[in-house]
């Protein structure tokens, strides 16, 4: 390309620009701190807006936008112009710097040429083109080319140097250009920043689109304001310690995984980290001037520390991986934030997205590039209110759930305690005092101390909140759909309650947990009446230890399914338990036991194993025993009926039909029934009493009988002799016939 | 009615010794318990039935443990009932744990103590791992010995312990009172290093015990036989030998021989009949017309007295008074 044309192009470009680099750097007399204050010149208000607009325009026209925030890519004329605009705008800031010790710029206020023409990088500028002005010659140092400009060139662009698209692989040594303010290495192949440490007045360094892998060689450039490192291979933010005046830092299109080593950049206004590999945002402390933060196209899942950025106005989080508002909730605490984007995140797909954001960030003016209207705000608050209500409800729910969990835990603890006590007492009852490690009194003491806290109060508020669920600390009753769950023995009392017909009819599954089976047995008749449709019984931690306990279930109306959890029910460990259940409850023709379908083979097996028992029980049991055993079962039922129904008429009929069912269904297995331990012990006591009486009675009887027998035997022994004696006496008496006759006559006359 | 010993004892003691009193008391007790029902069908009928059931050994079904263990006859009846009811479990080949056997026992006797089952299991398992599985026959024969001779075995255990300790328990059953006012026996000395006790000495002690023992004990001749085969033996070794001894089982008379343990044709027939009903079980349930009264027993009860099982029963002289009881019920 001909330099003239080139120049005209760049001239035009420069003319289109309102103002060039306009840096005003003043040393103030304020010695205390190095404070850089950016003031925009007359174009001030548009600066950010326009910068942003460029960004956004490109963003929205193509998704490539992130790479172009500040770095111009002059592919054609227009873009060349716009990029110029970009740069000049950037540099058109009137930077008023107040520095206590500004070594690079000296102590005098320096006025950079306000309308200097910027030498534009030209896309076709080859080495030969630039050859007119720039000589890249090999120096004594073989690896680095040495750059020298013609003096004319130097005068013309004394403060800027552009080396765009020069296919540079290293930074050339730039000699005699210490006054350079702007240095441009765009679109080269530079892998390492070097040889520029002498350019201590450098304000603008553009290394866009190179192959730099590490930030380095910048430590002397203390006046650097704009550092453009977009589209490189940087993995780590580092070595920026001395760049205290940095105003714009562009690191887009690199491989940075985390934000670090930036907390000292208190003057930084713009930070571009788009298209990196960030997984989260934090470490933002100290960036007190940051107004714009671009984080598009990362993999960010959560954002922290944003509330520590007092000046942040624009935050771009588009195309990340944010899925909950909680992960970015710190944004709500930022008072300065007015513009934010979330598009392209999972969160933006959610129905609650917009109103949640608006509700939590009332300071917002723009969301995803759209102005936030009053209407939207109002909607958001309405929705949020609803949301809040829902949340409160769910909170209540979860509170309730938690309460339930706690209660169950409590019941479980109590149960364990109780079990422990039983097991430690049981050996004593058996007469085996062998090795009982627990001191009984100590044990009792611990239970006593544990009880008061357990017998807590009923939380009436919560109970009323959810119908059908009552929570107390020692037991829990819950109706969930068709399942009635009872935890803790106290829960059995709930069967006395007046259940609504609907609820009672709906319940088909009854589950018992942490309740002694013997206690359950006592309420089975109640269960039968209150929940006539219950088909599925579940037992867990109920201390089912014996096969005969299953006998008790036979009195129910119907059982389709039985689930006995091995936890706390040792009986399940027996190989025979299932068959015994099938055998004993065969009149229910059960369908499932512990979730397994009952097959015909199971039924036959059950019968094969226990059929004889039933047969023996029914056919060999003496009649009088049959009466007494069946009588017991019937009596038990009568007793309950009498208790509950009182003096209702028609009672007799019901009893009859009930007992009819009982006997009819069981036929030969009715004799196999279960009496709870307490009841059985009571019966044994009763029997003992009776036995005592019988013993005494029999003793008397037998004694009497043996006495009689003895007398009888004695008589038998004496009788032959007696008889002989009697006969002998008689014979002697009548031997003298005449005298005997006389005597007889005498007696007769005496009688007269 | 005229057994010779009858004249040797006062009547009352005689009746008590033959456990007639036990049954009479129990009969009255049963009568008392179900007065109303029984009076409906006749007290004479009740007594007939009661003593019949005692003869057949069915009187112990579902009774309380104190009654079941009250007489040797009851014990034998219980053993037989257990065998009869759960023979099928053994036949099925299931190996069960001690607790499971205990559950089966409890099906017949709700308050059967765990201790006895444990002891029986200990005989099978030789005092180790109590959670092991046992075969039905092993358990049954061990249980027979333990249950039927439990008092005897307790005394034996005491003697054994004394012998182990080097004391001579010959004169007394209660081990604590074994002071030295009796015939001297050589202390065990070096022999005690070995496991168990010397068989001959043990045998002598047991002979004495059998003479004195008021509870039933195995026929002394058979005990001697068991002990004569070995030099030394342990307590559990002795129990195992007892439980496996064919003659003792016969003498006890409750169970068939080991070979015939699974054999019970009458019951098998019955079982087949029951199995045939299984498919129709669903339908047959509500079919019972007059269910309010007691279920009619299916077959007219065959009085299957189990006495003819072994003729050797008279070996155990004081086993039970079944003859007398039969007479009682007939008068």
Image: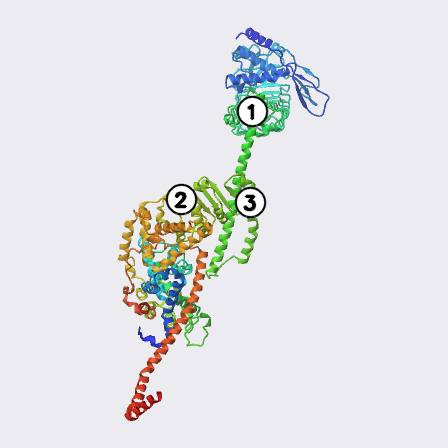
Colouring mode (rainbow / by chain / secondary structure / one colour): rainbow
Question: In the rendered image, which residue does mark 1 sit on?
Answer: A379
For residue B321, above or below residue A583? below
Residue sticking out furthest to the front: A752
Same-chain status of marks 2 and 3: yes
Query: Considering the image in quadrants, where does the C terminus of chain B appear?
Result: bottom left
Q: Position of residue A60 (x, y in %)?
A: 52, 18
Chain letter of disc 1?
A
Spatial separation of the CA atoms under disc 1 and disc 2: 50 Å
Chain-order first, disc 1 or disc 2 = 1
Tag 3's secondary structure?
loop
Disc 1 and disc 3 in contact, CB within 8 angstroms? no
First-in-chain label (2 vs 3): 3
Count of numbered circles on the image: 3
The answer to whether the residue labelled 1 contacts the one labelled 2, judged by CB atoms less than 8 Å apart, is no
**Circle 1 or circle 3, nearest the eye:** 3
Subunit under mark 2? A
Q: Which residue is mark 2?
A: A535
The residue most toward the right is A29
Alpha carbon separation for disc pair 2 and 3: 30 Å
What is the x, y in percent for residue A720? 31, 83
Q: Secondary structure at mark 1?
A: helix
Residue B324 left/right relative to A569: left
């Amino acid at each position: 390309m001909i330099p003239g044309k080139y120049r005209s192009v760049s001239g035009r470009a420069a003319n289109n620009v309102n103002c060039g680099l306009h840096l005003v750097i003043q040393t103030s007399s304020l010695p205390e701190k190095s404070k850089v204050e950016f003031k925009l010149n007359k174009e001030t208000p548009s600066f950010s807006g326009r910068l942003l607009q460029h960004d956004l325009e490109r963003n929205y026209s193509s998704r490539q936008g992130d790479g172009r925030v500040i770095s111009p890519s002059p592919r054609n004329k227009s873009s060349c112009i716009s990029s110029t605009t970009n740069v000049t705008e950037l540099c058109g800031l009137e930077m008023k710097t107040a520095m206590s010790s500004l070594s690079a710029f000296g102590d005098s206020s320096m006025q950079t040429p306000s309308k200097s023409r910027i030498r534009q990088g030209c896309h076709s500028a080859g080495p030969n083109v630039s050859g007119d002005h720039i000589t890249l010659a090999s120096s004594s140092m073989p690896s680095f080319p040495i750059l020298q400009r013609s003096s004319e060139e130097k005068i013309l662009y004394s403060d800027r140097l552009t080396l765009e698209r020069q296919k540079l692989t290293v930074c050339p040594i730039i000699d005699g250009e210490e006054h350079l303010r702007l240095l441009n290495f765009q679109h080269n192949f530079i892998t390492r920043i070097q040889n520029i440490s002498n350019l201590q007045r450098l304000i603008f360094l553009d290394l866009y689109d190179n192959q730099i892998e590490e930030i380095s060689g910048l430590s002397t450039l203390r006046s650097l304001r704009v550092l453009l490192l977009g589209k490189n291979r940087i993995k780590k933010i580092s070595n920026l310690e001395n760049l205290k005046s940095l105003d714009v830092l562009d690191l887009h299109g690199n491989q940075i995984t985390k934000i670090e080593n930036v907390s000292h950049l208190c003057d930084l206004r713009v930070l571009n980290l788009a298209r990196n590999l960030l997984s989260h945002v934090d470490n933002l402390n100290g960036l007190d001037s940051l107004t714009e933060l671009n984080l598009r196209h990362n993999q960010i899942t959560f954002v922290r520390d944003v509330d520590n950025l007092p000046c942040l106005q624009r935050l771009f989080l588009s195309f990340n991986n944010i899925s909950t508002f909680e992960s970015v909730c710190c944004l709500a605490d930022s008072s300065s934030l007015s513009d934010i984007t979330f598009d392209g995140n999972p969160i933006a797909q959610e129905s609650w997205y917009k109103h949640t954001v608006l509700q939590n960030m009332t300071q917002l003016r723009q969301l995803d590039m759209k102005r936030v209207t009053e209407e939207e705000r109002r909607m958001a608050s309405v929705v949020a209110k609803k949301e809040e209500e829902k949340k409160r409800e769910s909170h209540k729910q979860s509170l309730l759930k938690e309460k339930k969990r706690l209660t169950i835990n409590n019941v479980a603890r109590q149960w364990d305690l109780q079990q422990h006590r039983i097991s430690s007492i049981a050996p004593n009852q058996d007469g085996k005092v062998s090795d009982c490690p627990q001191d009984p009194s100590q044990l009792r003491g611990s239970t006593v101390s544990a009880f008061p806290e357990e017998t807590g109060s009923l939380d009436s508020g919560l109970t009323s909140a959810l119908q059908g669920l009552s929570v107390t600390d020692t037991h829990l009753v819950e109706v969930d759909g068709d399942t009635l769950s009872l935890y803790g023995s106290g829960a059995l009392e709930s069967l006395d309650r007046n259940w609504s017909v609907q609820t009672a009819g709906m319940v088909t599954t009854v589950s018992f947990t942490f309740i002694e089976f013997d206690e359950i047995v006592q309420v089975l008749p109640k269960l039968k009446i209150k929940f006539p449709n219950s088909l599925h019984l579940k037992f867990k931690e109920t201390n089912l230890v014996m096969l005969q306990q299953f006998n008790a279930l036979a009195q129910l109306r119907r059982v389709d399914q039985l689930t006995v959890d091995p936890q706390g029910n040792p009986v399940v460990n027996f190989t025979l338990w299932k068959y015994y259940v099938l055998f004993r409850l065969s009149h229910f023709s059960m369908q499932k036991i512990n979730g397994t379908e009952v097959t015909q083979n199971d039924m036959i097996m059950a019968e094969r194993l226990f059929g004889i028992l039933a047969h023996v029980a029914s056919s060999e049991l003496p009649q009088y025993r049959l009466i007494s055993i069946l009588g017991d079962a019937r009596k038990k039922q009568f007793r309950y009926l009498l208790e509950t129904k009182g003096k209702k008429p028609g009672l007799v009929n019901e009893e009859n039909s009930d007992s009819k069912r009982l006997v009819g269904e069981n036929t030969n297995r009715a004799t196999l029934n279960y009496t709870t331990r307490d009841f059985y012990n009571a019966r044994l006591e009763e029997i003992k009493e009776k036995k005592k009486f019988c013993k005494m009675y029999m003793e008397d009887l037998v004694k009497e009988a043996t006495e009689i027998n003895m007398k009888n035997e004695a008589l038998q022994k004496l009788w032959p002799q007696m008889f002989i004696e009697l006969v002998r006496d008689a014979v002697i008496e009548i031997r003298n016939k005449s005298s005997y006759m006389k005597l007889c006559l005498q007696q007769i006359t005496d009688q007269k | 009615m005229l057994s010779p010993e009858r004249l040797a004892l006062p009547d009352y003691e005689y009746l008590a010794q033959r456990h007639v009193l036990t049954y009479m008391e129990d009969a009255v007790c049963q009568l008392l318990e179900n007065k109303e029902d029984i009076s409906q069908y006749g007290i004479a009928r009740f007594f007939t039935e009661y003593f019949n059931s005692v003869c057949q050994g069915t009187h112990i079904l579902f009774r309380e443990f104190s009654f079941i263990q009250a007489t040797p006859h009851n014990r034998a009846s219980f053993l037989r009932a257990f065998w009869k009811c759960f023979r099928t479990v053994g036949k099925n080949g299931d190996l069960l744990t001690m607790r499971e056997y205990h559950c089966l026992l409890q099906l017949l006797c709700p308050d059967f103590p765990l201790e006895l089952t444990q002891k029986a299991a200990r005989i099978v398992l030789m005092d180790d791992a109590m959670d092991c599985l046992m075969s039905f026959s092993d358990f049954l024969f061990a249980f027979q010995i333990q249950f039927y001779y439990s008092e005897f075995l307790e005394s034996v255990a005491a003697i054994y312990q004394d012998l182990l300790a080097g004391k001579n328990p010959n004169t007394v059953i209660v081990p604590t009172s074994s002071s030295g006012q009796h015939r001297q026996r050589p202390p065990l000395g070096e022999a005690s290093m070995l496991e168990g006790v010397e068989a001959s000495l043990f045998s002598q002690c047991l002979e004495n015990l059998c003479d004195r023992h008021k509870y039933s004990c195995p026929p002394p001749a058979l005990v001697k036989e068991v002990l004569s085969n070995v030099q030394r033996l342990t307590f559990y070794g002795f129990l195992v030998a007892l439980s496996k001894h064919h003659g003792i089982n016969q003498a006890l008379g409750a169970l068939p021989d080991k070979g015939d343990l699974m054999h019970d044709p009458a019951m098998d027939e019955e079982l087949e009949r029951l199995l045939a009903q299984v498919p129709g079980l669903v339908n047959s349930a509500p079919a019972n017309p007059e269910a309010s009264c007691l279920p009619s027993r299916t077959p007219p009860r065959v009085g299957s007295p189990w006495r003819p099982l072994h003729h050797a029963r008279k070996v155990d002289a004081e086993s039970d008074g079944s003859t007398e009881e039969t007479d009682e019920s007939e008068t």
